[in-house]
Amino acid sequence: MAQTTAEFLIEQGKVEGKQDAILKLLQFRFQDVPEVLSREIRNIHNLTHLDTLLEQAMTAQSLEEIDTHLS
């Protein structure tokens, strides 16, 4: 079944909201977020992957623990 324009826009809003939340949390916890990491997060559009990254952002002890290349 094809996705309607409204469904696409809703999905896109969820993706952007999660990306924003992850980046804001990382900035709060670690101050400076490298541009490379920020770009990698912005390029992820899978909500499940973003959920995993959000959990990592909450529990990581360093930015090196954030894995944007989940399989």
Image (cartoon, rainbow, N blue to C red):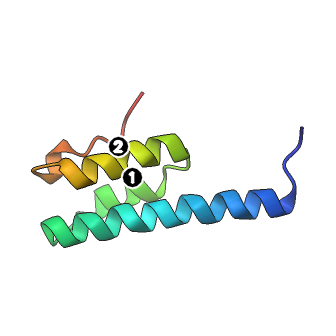
User: In the rendered view, would you say 63 is above or below 9?
Assistant: above
Q: Position of residue 19 (x, y in %)?
A: 45, 61
Q: Position of residue 24 (x, y in %)?
A: 32, 71
Q: In the picture, residue 34 is in which quadrant? A: bottom left
Using the image, tell me which numbered label, if any, was put on residue 40.
1
Give the SS element for disc 2.
loop
User: In the rendered view, would you say 29 is above or below 57?
Assistant: below
The C terminus lies in which quarter of the figure?
top left
The residue carrying mark 2 is: 68
Give the SS element for disc 1.
helix
Q: Is there a contact, CB below 8 Å, between mark 2 and mark 1?
A: yes
3D distance between C-alphas at marks 2 and 1? 7 Å
Label 1 Cα crowd, 10 Å radius (few <14 / some 14-19 / many 20+): few
Q: Position of residue 20 (x, y in %)?
A: 43, 68
First in residue order: circle 2 vs circle 1? 1
The kind of residue tagged 2 is Thr
Would residue 19 appear left or right of 68 to someone viewing this image?
right
Q: In the picture, residue 30 is in which quadrant? A: bottom left
The N terminus lies in which quarter of the figure?
top right
Identify which residue is drawn at 23% across, 70% down: 27
Identify which residue is drawn at 24% across, 46% down: 66
Would residue 6 appear left or right of 33 to someone viewing this image?
right
User: In the rendered view, would you say 69 is above or below 26?
Assistant: above
